[in-house]
Amino acid sequence: MELSRSADKDDATNVAASPRRPDIQQQYHMQSKNESKVKEDMRRISNDLEDSWKASSYANQQLKITQWKKEKLKLDVFVTSPILIDQWLFESWLAGNTAKQAATQRRAAFNNTTFDVNVISNSITRETYDQFRNFELVERYLQHPDLLDSQSLIVIEEPVFKELVKRYYAISNDIIRGLAGRKLKNRNRSSLDEACERLRIPLTVARRQFDNLKRIYTVITEKKREGKIEGKLGEAIQKTFLLPPRLAERYARNVFLCYHQIETDDKRLRFLQARDLEFFASVMMNRWTKEGSQLEIDLTFKEDLRDLRTYLLGDKNHLESFKGLVMESMRRDQVEEWKLSKLADRFVVIAKVLLNIGAGMLKSKEFEDIFEDIEEKVTDALIKMGMIEKDITRFFSSLSGQPFEAILHRLTIQTRHKQRFLSTWPKFVSALMELVLHFYSAQQAAVAGSTQSQNMSSSQGLSSTASTAPETIRRQQGSTNVLEKLSK
Amino acid sequence: MPCTVKVRVIEARNLPVMDRSSDLTDAYVELRFLDSVKKTEIRRKTLNPIWNEDFRFEVPQDSQLQDHPIKLKVYDHDVVSADDVIGTIHVDLNCLLNKSGGQIAGWFPIFDTLRGIRGDLNIVVKVELFGDVNEFREASTGVQFIASSKPELFHEIVESQGLVAYIVVKSDPEYHWMDNFRASRISNEERQLLLYNLSGKLRRHIGKKAIEMGGNTVLGYNQYFDLEGENGIVARGYGTCCTTKDIREGGINTEDASPLVPKKIASLNIPHSGSLENMSTILSTPEIKDNMMNSSNFPVKLLTLNNFEIEDVERFGGIVIARSVKYLSHAKSSSAKGGKKLRNEWWQEIREEIRTHARFFGCDTVIGYHEMFTMDCDKEICVLTAVGTAAMMSSKYSGPIFNDQTSTATREEKIKRKAQECSNHFCHIPHKHRKPPYNMKLTLCNICKKKYVPQVLITSIEPPNGISVTGKGCLLEARICREKKKFQGEMNAIAVSEGLPFMEYNLHRQLMYKLRIMGMNAAFRLKMQIAIGESLIVAIATATAFFIPALPSPRTLQINRSLDVVDEEDKQLLAIQNRIVYLSRQNQLQLANASTVQYSQQSQSTTLSTTPGNETIQPALTPEDQTIVPEDEELKSSSEGDPNRSFIVEVDDSMDEDIMAVLLEPPIPHGFSFCNTETLPGGNPVKSNGQMITAIRRVEWQTSTKRMNQQFSSIFHNLYSTILFKVRALAPCCLCSLTVDIHLPRDDQLEITLNAMVVLESEETAAEEERNASVASTPASSSGLFSEEELQFSMEMVQQKKSLNLHRMAGLIELLEQDSRSNPRGVELTPMTFIPGTHLLKYIGRINMHLIKESFTVKEQGGLGNFTHVFVNEVHAVVRSHVAALGGNALLSYRVDESTIVENASKNQCYCLLSISGDVALVFSDRSHEHISDQLEEMSLNESIQ
């Protein structure tokens, strides 16, 4: 009797310590007579449980009263089978954070949730470390997703894994722009620092993108050498690297640019965005190559163009009469006369340029400069004549249409050859038209985005001059949006 | 029995680059079995070599196959220098020996002890046994080893003969004199091979014993390696020898299984020898030795089985524990053979003690029996522990009745009769209530009000199938930390053995207090762990607590404090104290309102037991019953309590305070639950397996503080809360089959190894409905192999023994086998004996994997944590591919038999050893089962048309 009474006294003295207690205590005494009261009490208890993450702060309180410092972990390993991947932390890892940084960010992210960060702070740190270990384990298979099926180290569902791969191979436009058409040598890899600093992208992220492109490049060129590529290049990448179709296609285009080391870094080309370059690559890959070997321009196609140049330039009259026919056809299309007169002055030069571009594809050195040639010698020349989009369209369609057939008719060559040229030339010219038109609109957009187009274009890409000011970057980003819309 | 082993080395893939100049590898494989060595051709300059070469080993004795694995070693050929090792694969053939014509085929990770997994090798291994039945053979092929307590599908236990155990001692290659100068890779590989040899030998000898005893299966098989340092490695194996029969055939499988009288394994009186001190206690009955009153000396069976049907249990006696402290230096000088003899004697003593304890309870069987071995960090002294539950069981477990000569009825009839009298008859005490073996409080059974029951029931087994449970169970864990004076040698052994009873007492006290705070009156699956440091002894006891309606509801806890409140800290302690008292009452309230359900494990034995109808269903507590408890409570508090009814904890000094403070467990967040049983009694219905989790944590702690116990507990609390946080995405879920190992690598460091299965639960509301439904109708069939009708169908098939049906069934199983076979990544690992949502098709065999990894560049690999993380993952990969190669898709009863992690930070070096075992099984999911039963129907339709 004595004992229990004294215990009750203790209770009474401590009511103040825990504010929730008095009413519960009262209820506790009353409830047994009233069943509904019991139920209410039950609800209270379950509410208690619901709040239990918070309630487990109780454990922390208990910690505080003790004299020892926070326990020191010498080793903490947590392995799940199958593997657990936290998407949030994965994203953080991809962004190049260390586990420590990620944990700090995570704590901040938990601030607005129902969790009490003080309580789970330690758990967050531990989870972050576990997850980062998992990521390191998975990384090898992210780099070689085709190995996923032949390994037993990681148990992961394929959709989850594909999602991870997709994020791992994500492309940032600024980085890929700097890599397009480059030799993927380690020297270039180390030169990424500068660009990263400027673009405020973590170096690890840039390096990963470089490595990703290089890896895909290596695998694809290896496969090409062995003749193992079937179908389109994008499909091959999609299959080998388990990438979503669009992303695979982007990689295919960049691989193409790198394979031919097409110059994209010239001053005149700096206004081009990654999406533009990819568009050019896709036009060339789709129009001028054969399926199954999309990496190389079709050889007969290139030879045809070389031969055509030889024939057309063989006699000066050929180009002159071609000019007359084209003019006539364009006049019929109601192109303004002042433009036509300007064109008449420059036609032979432009035609020669076009023929040279076509024939030059046989020599890789000349093919490397194809973008420069198109920009400088074709697009700029046409724009200087005051031509706008529809004029350019008419010009190219008349180049490949009726006038070309007529001039071909006049050539003294075998019909066999004529047949060849009849299919090759329009294929060449129509693709070229798409390129020029895109150049045109890209240029227009660039000009619209910045009055100082010269200044702006110099801030493009990796090799920009040191004088680049932050404002121009911002302006350039504005133009990027326009360009991206256009390229879509 | 002579036999031929055929090995086909097909190809390898993803080999590492071994030649820097060409970035390629010139690989070949060396096959080694005992002394014979064979090699494949060298495949030059490729990372994916293809060999397609066949090899054949002729083995004169199949016992050799049991003892030794085939070792395949992949090398890189080098013209100038010696060939470099790429990695090794050990293929244990034990699983193939049960039937001729079996094969292991598949990709095996090539594992190197220094570099980890380096590619995979595709091989096929076949064993051809010649039929040669020799009475004196060395081998013991044909005996099935299963870690769980249940036999295969369509098999049932006819008789259990009792404990089979064996010990092998071998010197440890790590401590060989050659280890001073040979490469670490070589000694690692030698150690791995030795562990394979040891586990093979153990099984062979235990199998032989089982055959001698007339059994054909060893259930509840356990195997442990005690790495005693210079004394060598002691491999211990023990299990329960059983005779099982295929209920489809109605005959006993083995030809030599005769209804033998069970042979006693232990001769009864082994004189003490070599041991210095022999200490023993029975939990809760320290005075039992004085109380020797039972003169009869009937034999007691030790069974390592954990899962039973409620019909099999006649009476629970209580938990029995025997401990013994041994001084290992005595064993040092003796040879391996002497060491084996010595250890055999040690264990025999312990087992005999357990038997004696069981006799005090008047029980002739000890179930849930297991043995433990703990060494101090100097490997000088060790503590042997045996724990079990004394019980009286049905005759298939206990055999004919020994102690009850008056009754002529068989045990089954007796149980049945009792079941009619009281559904919770198993709670009744096994002895007369007027003369209990020791002083204990007894009350009348809540159900029948006739027989006496104890206050609480603690056992070491899983809750039997069909037991009624009120409310929801939860994990119960008591943790004690005790200081010990530092001593050397024999003095140390004395100090430990003197300290142990106090620790045991405190552990038990804490267990009881916590049980009361929870408002529970039963704890199942009690497991204990102790660790001995230089100046510390720590111990934990883990169990799953729940409420059995037959037992009296526990008295609420009261704390009497005679200390003054002086400072801030005291106030907080007082707050804790009040909180405890409050919780204790709340929990009781909560339980009073909970409904009673029948517990059932998911097991095929439930549904395949011969008579589905005889299960007596315990009706839920009537409303009156439910209100009785709180009314009692009210009465008590109004009358200001009689001291007998409320449970009083005295807090007189700081030590008491320390122990009191740890009684409060932080609440477990909503949506999670913990249990160390396979399913949570009274928990929500389980949906499917989530994740198997393995956590290893090594914590540095302060050993000088007074609050050791609080510190010890908080380490666990932190671990649990971190784990819950990490699996929060899986909620609602239950962490089942939780096992915790503690270890003191150094005095100021505590290592906890935790393994559990996160089982996904269905949403609460649905659970509630389902539970209501199951209470209303048939609780037992809620989670069986087949639904009720199907069950009857399959039962019919069995009973009628239509050969046609059986034939069809066999065909279906084959169909299912093809269906379920999958790649290694589809293999599930689980510490439980079943996978929720699936059904066991067959046990393929038991595998043991022993892997070692060592590194001399730990920092570069991201530290010890990262290294261990990778290693555990690699071990799982190796295990999974072995399971898949054997044709299984799950590893049940996954268990870590031995784990060692040693770090030498100054040398940037670390060493990990993991030994893993489990039952390879083929399971099929409910979905594919539906698919199959559709086919079954179709087939029967077709037949009827014909």
Image: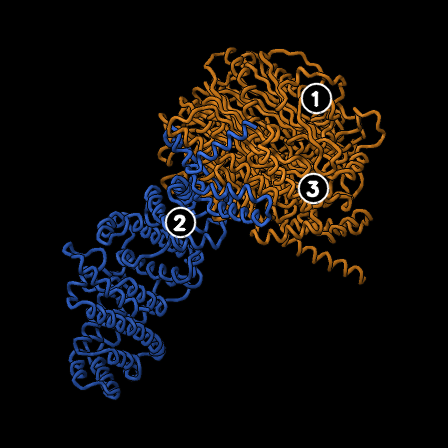
Looking at the image, which is closer to me, B150 or B73? B150
Looking at the image, which is closer to me, B574 or B297? B574
Q: Are marks 1 and 3 on the same chain?
A: yes
Q: Secondary structure at mark 1?
A: loop
Residue B412: image location, x then y, percent: 80, 35
Q: Which amino acid lies under the numbered mark 2 shown in the image of this protein?
A: Gln
Give the letter of the chain under mark 2. Answer: A
Relative to residue B98, is residue B486 depicted above or below? above
Which dot marks residue A166?
A: none
Give the letter of the chain under mark 3. Answer: B
Say whether disc 1 or disc 3 marks the residue closer to the N-terminus: 1
Whole-angstrom CA distance, mark 1 to mark 3, is 29 Å
Which dot marks residue B437?
A: 1
Q: Residue at x 28, y 49 (%)?
A: A202
Residue B383: image location, x then y, percent: 56, 20
Decide if residue B901 is on the left or right side of residue A280.
right
Q: Which chain is blue?
A: A
Q: Which chain is orange?
A: B
Whole-angstrom CA distance, mark 2 to mark 1, is 69 Å
Q: Based on the displayed image, in which of its 4 quarters is residue A320 positioned?
A: bottom left
Relative to residue B682, is residue A338 depicted above or below? below
The residue that disc 3 covers is B466
Whole-angstrom CA distance, mark 2 to mark 3, is 52 Å
Q: Which amino acid lies under the numbered mark 3 shown in the image of this protein?
A: Gly
Q: How many marks?
A: 3
Q: Secondary structure at mark 3?
A: loop
Which of the two discs, 1 and 3, sits closer to the camera?
Answer: 1
Which of the two discs, 2 and 1, sits closer to the camera?
Answer: 1
Q: Based on the displayed image, in which of its 4 quarters is residue B23 positioned?
A: top left
Give the letter of the chain under mark 1. Answer: B
The residue that disc 2 covers is A143
Looking at the image, which is closer to me, B659 or B748? B659
